[in-house]
Amino acid sequence: MPDNTMQDAAEIGRITKLIVEAMQLSTDPVTAAGAVHLSSLALASVEQARQVARCIAAFTTDDALADAMEEIVDESPAFLISQVPAVHHELAKFTGPHADLEKRVWTLIYAGRRERSRVMQTLVRRRVL
């Protein structure tokens, strides 16, 4: 296994661990319960791991958790949300380079247990849309 691949795998593991730990502490019970599903995403790149953090920040109603995800990817709230195209389609249409991943995060952790409108209202309240 080349050094780059090992380094990427270590970074994916580090980011995923940070995401799971933050999710488990969330005041959003849907997010906290969904932390167990992250391992089933089988992330293949550091960028995918970062995109999961962006999705969690976009999809959660827990402001403190969104802040934690912003720290993990080191991006401003507005930029972070701009990287999740699904929010611009009110979580009904998934497009862009990470469309499948975004849809899997939404489906595994949030869909069927949360109204899309509540998530969208949270994003408007945070002034990131």
Image (cartoon, rainbow, N blue to C red):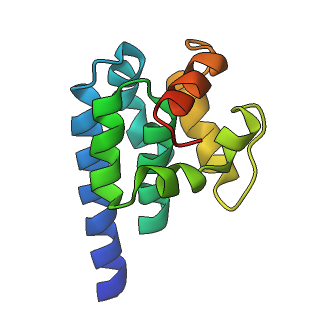
Identity of the residue drawn at 76% across and 31% down = 92
Q: Is residue 89 left or right of residue 13?
A: right
71 or 43, nearer to the observer: 71
Place residue 116 in its image quadrant.
top right
Q: Is residue 89 above or below residue 120?
A: below
Identity of the residue drawn at 51% across and 38% down = 127
50 or 116, nearer to the observer: 116
Q: Is residue 65 above or below residue 27?
A: below
Quarter of the image with the N terminus is bottom left
Q: Is residue 6 above or below residue 73?
A: below
**Residue 85 at x, y percent in the picture:** 67, 50
45 or 126, nearer to the observer: 126
**Residue 15 at x, y percent in the picture:** 29, 56
Could one spot residue 88 in this view of the protein? yes
**Residue 55 at x, y percent in the picture:** 50, 43
Identity of the residue drawn at 29% across and 87% down = 3
Quarter of the image with the C terminus is top right
Place residue 12 in its image quadrant.
bottom left
Say how many tags the image has. 0
**Residue 35 at x, y percent in the picture:** 35, 30
Place residue 102 in its image quadrant.
top right
Could one spot residue 45 in this view of the protein? no
